[in-house]
Amino acid sequence: MDMRALGSSGLTIAPLVLGGNVFGWTADEAASFAVLDAFLDAGFNAIDTADVYSRWAPGHSGGESETVIGKWMKARGTRDRVVLITKVGQDMGAGGKGLGRAHILAGAEASLKRLQTDRIDLYFSHFPDPATPIEETLEAHRALVDSGKVRAVGGSNYDAAGLEAALKAGEAAGRARYSVVQPHYNLYERGLYEGAFEDLCVREGLGVIPYFALASGFLTGKYRSEADFGKSPRGGGMKRFLNPRGLAILAALDAVADRHGATPAQVALAWLMARPGVTAPIASATSVGQMRDIAGAAAVKLAPGDIAALDAAGAPV
């Protein structure tokens, strides 16, 4: 398996990150364990979650995904085989929110407890917090790194100006510096990453692990008309993609997939894997079958003509 350096974090990961947002939510504990087992057996190693997953679900309070992953690592003895990624900052109700020092330190302790581990490999600021000076945030992250509870830190959902300011602030003594970013980026959603943000990431040598790599499932090709919306709990959100540009992207994915004997999902992920500057995309699976499908993306090697056709179909308008 091709292993990639994750920026200057000192971590190396395989070219696909498993998204943990579904664990304990649309994938119960047994299904989650099966997906995690199959993912690791396939040679991959990085698992992404967050403290807030899945607080949005009725009856959930957050921490459900971390709890499942922690149980799995303990049951399987896999902690040392995993690059463990989680995040802090989203509203945890009584547990607090934001990127202030007290909440980051408390959030890390709560995540460590749920994950049943003594360290987090990569700890993200989940969203920028305009109410907290970035200096305070990075000083809290430095305290966690210095204590050995966190190995590296990153920023998620920043724009170019915010990321540049955070990187500059992280150069000062006593502060951690983001070495990895997690942007919203896929073949349909390109404007948030491409351009100034991507240029900054490449220039600074940052690790890049995009989320929503399959556009919440649209790029799998499963949703081609409103009649398909009932195929999953996320189906209702597909309407925004069903436009001429979205359908052109699906047609291009179909054509490239046919040439490679692959699936649209594999091609969409392979397009991200081939993007200069992208370390590895994040994709979720609720079954072993889905996991095996997305894992197959690592074997799809797109030709320049394939990439050009996909670029043209998904060009921002």
Image: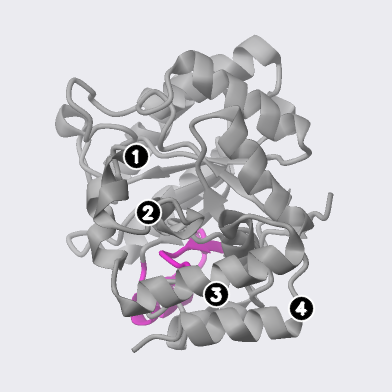
Residue to which mark 3 is pinned: 252
How far, Cα to Cα, is label 2 from label 1? Answer: 8 Å
How far, Cα to Cα, is label 4 from label 3? Answer: 14 Å
For mark 1, give the secondary structure.
helix
Q: Looking at the rendered structure, which numbered label has been put on residue 231?
A: 1
Screen quadrant of the C terminus: bottom left
Residue to which mark 4 is pinned: 303
Q: Are marks 1 and 3 in contact (CB under 8 Å)?
A: no
Residues shaded magenta: 158-187
Q: Within 10 angstroms of label 4, few (less than 14), some, or many (20 or more) residues?
A: few
Would residue 154 be found to the left or right of residue 228 on screen?
right
Q: Is residue 28 visible?
A: yes
Give the percent coordinates (x, y) of residue 224: 37, 59
Instruction: Name the residue located 37 percent from the left edge and 28 percent from the top edge.
Output: 26
Q: Are marks 2 and 3 in contact (CB under 8 Å)?
A: no
Whichever of callouts 4 and 1 sits on the residue coming sooner in the sequence is: 1
Whichever of callouts 2 and 1 sits on the residue coming sooner in the sequence is: 2
Would residue 157 be found to the left or right of residue 313 on screen?
left
For mark 3, give the secondary structure.
helix
Instruction: Name the residue located 52 percent from the left edge and 65 percent from the top edge.
Output: 173
Give the percent coordinates (x, y) of residue 271: 62, 69
Report the amino acid beneath label 2: Tyr
Whichever of callouts 4 and 3 sits on the residue coming sooner in the sequence is: 3
Q: Looking at the rendered structure, which numbered label has been put on residue 223?
A: 2
For mark 2, give the secondary structure.
loop
Quadrant location of residue 127?
Answer: bottom left
For mark 4, give the secondary structure.
loop
Q: Is residue 84 magenta?
A: no
Q: Are marks 2 and 1 in contact (CB under 8 Å)?
A: yes
How far, Cα to Cα, is label 2 from label 3? Answer: 15 Å
Q: Is residue 177 magenta?
A: yes
Report the amino acid beneath label 1: Lys
